[in-house]
Amino acid sequence: MNYKEAVEKQLSEDADEQKRRKLLWEDIVAAYDRGGEDEVKSALTAHAEKITKDFKEMLNQLMKKI
Amino acid sequence: MFTIKNLKIKGFRGYTDEKGFTFNNPITILSGENRRGKSSTLNAIEWCLFGNECIGINTGIRERVDWEIPNRNLGSRPDVYVEIELEDENKSSCKILRKWISLRRNDLKISSQDGQFQGDEAEKKLAQLLKLSFQDFLTTVYQHQEAIRAVLTQEPSERNEAIDRLLGLSVYRNILTGIDDGKIPSKQKEMDNAFDGFRNKLSAILDTRNKDLDDMKIQAIQKGLKEEQLNEKGVLDIAMIAKKQLEKFASESGLGLAELRVPDQWKGISLFQKDAEDEIKRLRSVMPDVKNQRELFERSSKFTQLKTEYDSRKGNIKAIEKGLEDLSKEKGKEDDLSNSKPQIEKQILEKEKAMSEANAKAATISKALEYLRLEGASKNTCPVCGKETADLLMHLKKEWEDKYEKQVGKIQDEINKLTIDLKVTISSLSKYRELKEKKEDINKALNEVNKKASELLGRVITDKDDLSALINNELNQIQEELRKLEQAVKSKQEILNGIGRLLEQAQIIVNILTDKEKKIIIDEIKQSVEYKRMEETKDIMAFLTDDIDKIKYAINAASNEDAKGKIDLAGNTIDNLFRKITNNPTISKVNLHVSADSKGKNNYDFKDQNDKEITPILSQGDLNALALSIFLGMAYLKGGGQSCGFIMLDDPSQSLGSEHKEKLIEVIGEVLESRMVILSTMDKELQNLVISKITKTKTQYVFDNWTPQGGPEISMG
């Protein structure tokens, strides 16, 4: 069992969460394979920024209304 | 299981020209001082088998970051390759040739009994052949210098990390580091703070609006409005009343009015208000009574100014007349002065003539006296007439004093008096003239005042008229008219003020309605799609953080389980090897335990037979032995099903004492029963021990020197 499978084995919870986490884990593994820990950092930062960007857009729109 | 048969290196790191190595004995020693190319030789084997996997931070070896493959002295297109000939237990061999192409590319060729392979096909073939990951290679085949150096640290967290690496678990730590560097929790916190800040802002705005609304309602009641009027209908009704009142006022005042439109909705009321206020302002200024009032004020102002001017001039005239009167009393009448002036002048002339005559004789006597004073008093002959007179000087002196001195002095006094009289007369006449000129100027100005008054009063002003009284009379009449007008204007202004108050009431209701609308906007914001999306996004971020936490937990748990599994399998071997190398009589058993530290990471304990922690009493040599034991333990662990028939030890005796080294040689002797060993060392004591104590046949390559142009100079030992 390689590290990827060993971690996946630990990630067992309810179906939806498991699926979501597994996908995130797969993203992390793919990033690590691509460029190591720096790439993991970049991938997660990009992931978070995508969410943050959406949030900021909504916030700016609402700020204009008040 | 395969072993290395031959090795060729060209242009790789410290190497320039091609160098060859043969590994036909159970142990090969690469000896020599530091920086002679020993490690480059082991690195070449590693690179040939694993290519770019050996490079970068993922290796867990610090020096591999930005690791350069080609020798720097070979120019821009270096010929770089490493060729390994592997041989299995059936003496079947294959050649593996890896050529460097560029920073990211290298080309692999494999020649074996199965055929020729190149590129990706060769990489696959090699993977099948090795049956070994790069991480496995690092933990079970190649004992890197850094693996021992890291274990030698006294810092527990660093030692734990080093043992993780020895156990082939660095991937877990690397990924955890990458995840932590992503700083997802702080980003989530940032987002939560921004959301909370926004929500608080909405609440604060809502509170302010409610307070403003309450204040405005109180103001509305104070302004005479009723609660039921504080709505759209209320404001429109008030606007309509204001409009009708303005129309009525304009009509009754005989004035025109601009068209005012009361809107259908309260939002248009501002325009109506502005128009209505403009009209009120205009009506105030064009109302006939106001106009009359303004004209009377202007007329009053003109008369007041005229009166001031008139009184001032009259005052000036009086002052001049007083001056003339005083002058007449003091200096005499002007006519008398004018008459006396020529008489005085004539008298002066006559006196001056008499003076001249008297002076002629007086001058002669005076000169004679002068002469006699100079010539001496003895002369008695008159220098003028030549007549002899006794005591002439005395005689002339007496005559001068008796006749001429008194006469001339008298005439001179008279002339002086007359001259003064003349000057006074002239000065007085001049004063008369000056005062009369002034009086004339003032009279001219008074004529102008009369002219203005005549124009204002609309009648001729004669000398018989008392202009001051006329002006006073006019001013009194104006004041009377103004008093009458004031009452009329006041009542009309009051009507317009009342309409203005209606508009103020309308404005208060508009303000209340605007505030209510803004309150609704805030409520709508909370119900908006954007707000809901923000909440959802916040939840997504929270899920991400939670997922990251769970994944980190899973990584730690997997790493922990992995470590436990490896310790279960290799623990006894590690124990045996460690005790063998250290030969510490107080330790009869070393139990390696792994648990999770406060952050979930692996924490290794080394306990003795009495379950007491031994790490605090381990020397640097013991820690070195511990690192070697773990490496060799892992090598044995993998040994059973492993394809690799050799291990590479790079400077294994860094901190070992002589006794430890002897024991290490014994252990290496045991390893040689099943594996070929390639040992790189600068330690002469260890070399000698290998040569004297290892009973298997050996090959020794001595790395004598190294130059940038020639690379390592290698000889057989």
Image (cartoon, grey):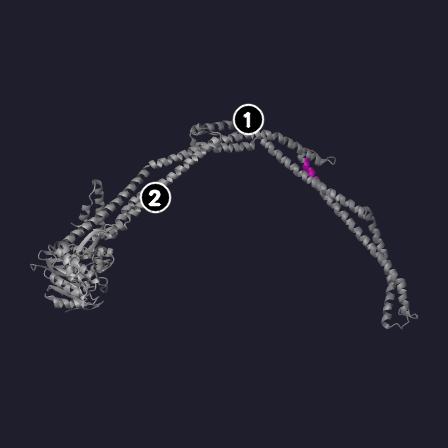
Please give the label number shown on residue B194. Answer: 2
Query: Is-magenta flag for residue B451?
Result: yes
Number of numbered discs present?
A: 2
Contact? badges 1 and 2 (CB < 8 Å) = no
How far across and how far down the image is residue B430, in percent?
77, 49
Query: In the rendered image of this protein, does residue B616 appear above or below residue B308?
Result: below
Q: Amino acid at mark 2?
A: Ala
How far across and how far down the image is residue B195, in percent?
33, 42
- Mark 1: few/some/many CA within 10 Å (<14, 14-19, 20+): few
Q: Chain of mark 1?
A: B
Query: Is-magenta flag for residue B293?
Result: no
Q: Residue furthest left?
A: B90
**Can residue B499 be seen here?**
yes
Q: Secondary structure at mark 1?
A: helix
Residue B645 figure quarter: bottom left
Secondary structure character of the magenta stretch overall: helix
Direction from residue B160 to residue B360 in the image, left or right: right
Direction from residue B227 to residue A13 in the image, left or right: left
Query: In the rendered image of this protein, does residue B564 appear above or below residue B230?
Result: below
Q: Earlier in the sequence, mark 1 or mark 2?
A: 2
Q: CA distance from mark 1 to mark 2?
A: 63 Å
- Residue that numbered label 1 is attached to: B252
Quadrant position of the C terminus of chain B in the picture: bottom left
Q: Specify the segment rendered in magenta.
A: B447-454
